[in-house]
Amino acid sequence: MKYQTQRVALAYFAVALALFAIQVTAGLLAGWIYVVPDTLSVLLPFNIVRMLHTNALIVWLLLGFFGAAYYLIPEESETEIYSTRLAYLQLVILVVGTLGAVVGYLFRIHEGREFLEQPLWVKLGIVVAALIFLFNVTVTVLKGRKTAITNVLLLGLWGIAVFFLFALYNPDNLGVDKLYWWYVVHIWVEGVWELVMAAILAFLMLKMTGVDREVIEKWLYAIVALSLFTGLLGTGHHYYWIGAPGYWQWVGSIFSSLEILPFFAMVLFTFAMVWKRRREHPNNAALLWSLGCAVLAFFGGGIWGFMHTLHGVNYYTHGTQVTAAHGHLAFFGAYVCLNLAIITYAMPHLLGRAPYNQVLNMISFWIMAGAMSFMTFTLTFAGVVQVHLQRVLGQGFMEVQDQLALFYQMRFGSGVAVVIGAILFLYSVLVPRRAEVIGRGPEAPAASPAE
């Protein structure tokens, strides 16, 4: 391994994968509760299970981003991480905060704001960890080579920290609360997270295709411009029904409709780079996850997001299973696939081995991608039925839910497949076959293709 401090990423990826396992397990349990609503209704009610599912998702994705930063910044900056002690301290704070939040949820100690349920002390711990991280990586970049990839990555990571500060503001007025709540929830996933996504994809394309850096950087800047232009004002599609001024219906409809453009640009970018590649990289599994990330993000975040973003449509679909369909495929395509791509690429390098278990890894991709796509179609059909029965015909919510039972059963079946795919992925990246272990030290010859 060229830069020894890259090993910090290994700890982050390990914790992220553990939380990934918890997240899909909690999601499967939540899906089962839709089928049999009384399951664990006293011991572990649905709202707590859902908190565990969504919070584990957010935390493991963030840990994956942090690990990716600690992995790629040394290579891009051509210098070691400023302080590994600070990096490990940051990880400890995040793990303690996560465990504290989980214990709090189990004992009904939480703020009750969706996705931001963490107690105040946990939020403050996250802020401290974020400050440590930003100091560590920013100083590293400043003392080394500056590239478009590190610049965009830092912009995204700083954006994550800045907009999280709005999570600390909890006004009494529900309309004002939602106004600023979306500053975190929307601008994270449809704004600054997209910058992190673009930077990591650019790094992967640079390493696996051998295309000139100048070409990749031009694509990267174009994607970043589209992401910021559409994502920030696209927040307006969440302001339709919270009492905000009427102009937000037009601002939200127009700019959120344009949010499909950066996702489409990422599809063009990844496939164009593979088409123009100047070398065959041995890690085909990482390449598959990278291409799958761009395609599924385009459909989940782009197509399914556009389907119900216009205010005339959103009036009927808001808060239905159509929203759940969009959310599941968008998160899986854009960020789950992204993290699994960088983990698939980095783990052999970090462990001093050649790429291993690639066939099994690629099988896990097709199982998870196929199951998540089936789940998306299932929830979409459920949402259309729900809109017609509940929002058009005026039937009661619970009466409609009874008529969606078949869709929920199919959703649970696809959830089982996702869990199976996740298990195969974890095995493929953590347990290489003996014949594939060609070295255990940092000087293992298998590391050279990644340089």
Image (cartoon, helix red, strand yellow):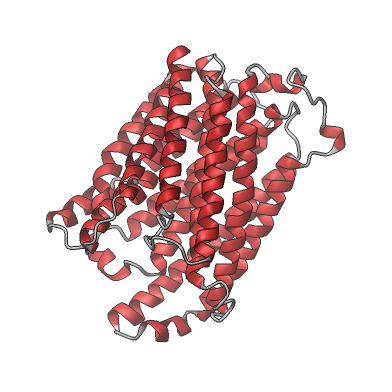
Whether residue 253 sits left or right of residue 25 in the image: it is: left
Q: Is residue 268 visible?
A: no
The residue lying at 28 percent from left, 70 percent from top is 316
Position of the C terminus by quadrant:
top right
Q: Return the x and y of residue 282 as percentages of the image width and height.
A: 69, 28
Give the image quarter of residue 419.
bottom right
The residue lying at 29 percent from left, 48 percent from top is 183
Q: Residue furthest right?
A: 435
Q: In the rendered view, tell whether residue 398 sits above or below residue 312.
A: below
Q: In the rendered view, tell whether residue 363 sits above or below residue 386.
A: above
Q: Return the x and y of residue 116 as percentages of the image width and height.
A: 40, 55
Position of the N terminus by quadrant:
top right
Q: Return the x and y of residue 375 as percentages of the image width and height.
A: 53, 64
* Of 316 and 132, the residue lying toward us: 132
* Of 271 and 41, the residue lying toward us: 41
Q: In the rendered view, tell whether residue 402 sits above or below residue 173.
A: below
Give the image quarter of residue 26.
bottom right
Q: Is residue 448 visible?
A: yes
The residue lying at 21 percent from left, 57 percent from top is 176
